[in-house]
Image (spheres, rainbow, N blue to C red):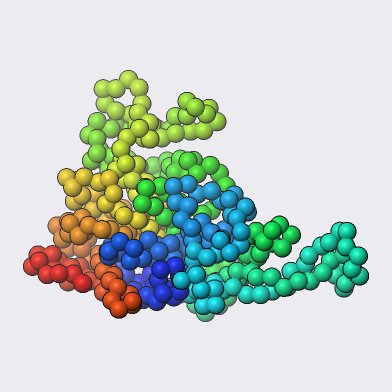
Amino acid sequence: MITKLDIKKFKDLDLLSIKDLNQVTLISGKNNIGKTSILEAIFLLFNYKYSSLLVPILGNRFASNLPFNIVYNIPFDFAINGIFSNYDHTSDILISSDNDEVVLKVINTDQSFIQPNSNIRPNSIGGNSVIVKTDSLNIQYKQNGKEYFTAAASKNITQNAMYAPQFKNVDVLPKILTRTILINEFGELFKIDDSLFSPREQWVILEYNNIRTNYRDLLNKYLIPGLRLLNPKINNVELGVDPLNSQLQRIELILDGESRPLPLSSLGHGSKRLFNIIIGIITARDGILLIDEIENGIHYSIIKKMWELIFKLAKENNCQVIATTHSLEFAGYVVNLTPEEQDLFSFVNIERANGQLLCATYDSKQFKYSINNNVEIR
C-alpha cells in the first residue's frame, strides 16, 4: 500500500504532493483539476516495464479503446507531448511513492541508421550504417533508491520519425511488485500483464476465469451479492459464447425465472462498473485498484451497500482502492459505515489557487466531522 505520492511535471500536474493515503482513498476536486492524471501517474509508476507503450496511450487518452498497436503508427512528438506539463520536454517527469520512483526525460542519443544504397564509407559498426543523433524518451525505474529498469522509446529515423516503444526483459526484479489495475470513467478495466495483446474485450473474462478457478469462494461471497444490489433476480454468473464470434466468450447472468441467460453487456452502465470493481479488487490482490469517477452509473439507493462491499473486499484481499469522484454526497455515505471500516478511509481534496495545486487529506474522523457539521471541505 502506498501512503504518499509525489508528482512533478506530469500532464496537468506541475507539482503535487499527497500524503496519508489509506487503504480506501477518495480524491475529489473540480473538473480538469488533474484527478484522472493522478490515477494515470500511479498506473504508469507500477507498470514501468510497459511504460514506453503506455506513454502515448495515457498521454493522449485513447480511453474508450486501448489500441496498443496504434503506438507504432504515430509521430514521436505526438506520442510524448501529452505526458509533459505544458508540453515542455526540457523538464523531467518524476512520479514517486513510498519506495518506488519513475523518471521520464527526453534525451538526444545515438541511433544506428542503415543506408543500403548509400555511397558513404562504412563506419566501425560495419555495412553502410551511420550513427546519427535523435531524440529518445528515457524511462528509469527505481525501488528503494536502487535502479531496476531503464528503457528508451526512440524517434525512429528510418520510419518518418515515428514513435518506437522499447521493451526490455528485467533480469533483476524488485522483491515486491505492486499489481495495479485501472477502471476508467467508462467503467472499462485496464490491466498490463502477459495478456496485454489479447482482445481488450476479453480482459475481464480472463480475470473472471482466473478468479473462478482460484478464488471461487469470493465470487459466491461478493460478486453475486454485489450484482443483486442492482438486480435481485441475478442467481449466478457464467461464461457463454459470443453469438457474433464463436471464438470469443462473454459474461452471462443467470436470472431467477428466466429460461435464457442475460449478457452482462446488455445491462446498464452501473452493472458493468460494479462488476468490474469487484473483479478488479480481487484481481489486484496485494496491489492497487484505481477507479476513475467511481460514482458513475450508480444509483444513490445502493451506495451504502456498495461501500460496505468495497471495504470488505479491499480488506480481505489486501487491496488498496484509490478512486476519484465529483460527488461529495457519494463520499458522505462512508460516515455510515462501521468504525473499523471508516478507519481504513481517507479523503483527498485538490484545489488550484494562483496557478498552484493545493492538496488536503482528511482522515475518517476529520471527514466525518466535516460531513456531520456541514463544514466546507477545502
Establish if 194 lies above or below 242: below
Given the current orientation, which residue lies at the most extreme top position? 259
Residue at x 50%, y 49% (from the top left corner): 66
User: If the image is split into quadrants, where does the N terminus sit?
Assistant: bottom left
* Quadrant of the rendering where the C terminus is positioned: bottom left
Relative side of 236 to 149, left or right: left
Q: Which quadrant would residue 219 be assigned to in this image? A: top left
Q: State which quadrant residue 149 falls in.
A: bottom right
Q: Left or right of 131: which side holds 288?
A: left
Residue 316 image offset from top left, x and y in percent: 32, 55
Answer with the quarter of the image where residue 240 lies. Answer: top left
* Residue occupying image coordinates x 53% and y 59%: 56
Q: Residue furthest left?
A: 373
Which residue appears at 85% of the width and 70% of the height?
125
Please provide percent x and percent y for residue 122.
90, 69
- Using the rendered image of the protein, determine whether residue 95 is visible from the camera's viewpoint: no
Q: Is residue 144 visible?
A: yes
Residue 143, given in percent of the width and then of the height, sits at: 51, 74
Numbered disc total: 0
In the rendered image, the vertical position of residue 302 relative to residue 39, given as above or below: above
Q: Residue shown at 51%/33% (left/top)?
A: 248
- Residue 299 lies, in percent from the top left, at 21, 45
Taking depth in this image into account, of 191 and 287 the one nearest to the observer is 191
